Amino acid sequence: MNNKETALELLLKADGLISQAKELLAQAVDDESESTNCAKDILADWREHLSTVDAYGLSEDDEVSSIVNGPYPQYIDDFNPYGTYPTEEYALMAQKMKIFNDKLLAFKWCYDRDYQPDWSDAKECKYMIRFDYNDGYYIVDTYFTWYYPAVYFSSAEIAQKCADWINSMKEKED
């Protein structure tokens, strides 16, 4: 009789655990659904705001241009829904970032095009260029693991050549 009670207790306990697992699974599905809806809501808010203001974008030659009373560019939905900006200040920030990344990629293609960081190797140095706001010029920085979405170079020497090249343009651009 004691074994039957123990088996019954175990079955009830198992049934309770199964119920808890089902509740946790349902909650996880709800949480995932909320996360997906949140991402869609952010994009919806972005589009809605852009439809109410004179938005800005980058033209084919990377110049900042106003999209005054123009329709929200349809191609952006397919390619980059965040490529139109609510203010000229935001468009200018995007322009500066794009031009900087374009320079990095052009240099990388010429001098280090085959290098791809091995993120599984924590000992491998990954060299990138960043702006040093204290000194006012571009410098080489190193990361051993993934930290920034950036253009990486295989050696400090190549990265330094790139930083020197970009710094030499600064005088011409100012």
Image: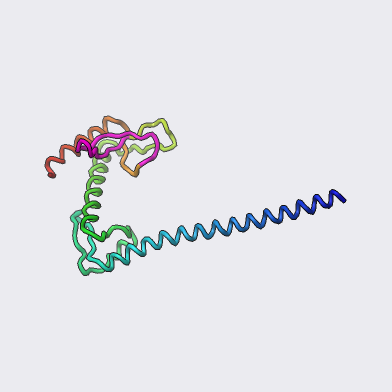
Does the magenta stretch mainly form a helix, a strand or a loop?
strand
Quadrant in which residue 76 is drawn: bottom left
Residue 166 position, x and y percent, is 20, 39
For the point 30% across and 37% down, the residue is: 128
Q: Nearer the viewer, residue 70 or 14?
A: 14
Say whether residue 171 is magenta: no
Scheme by which the image is coloured: rainbow
Where 130 falls versus 2 (above or below)? above
Quadrant in which residue 121 is drawn: top left
Where 157 falls versus 16 (above or below)? above
Q: Nearer the viewer, residue 107 or 163?
A: 163
Residue located farthest toward the right when viewing the structure as drawn = 1
Residue 129 position, x and y percent, is 27, 38
Where 22 falls versus 148 (above or below)? below
Q: Which residues are magenta?
A: 127-147
Residue 31 position, x and y percent, is 51, 58
Residue 65 position, x and y percent, is 19, 60
Which quarter shows the C terminus?
top left
Quadrant in which residue 83 is drawn: bottom left
For the point 36% across and 32% down, the residue is: 125
For the point 84% across and 52% down, the residue is: 4
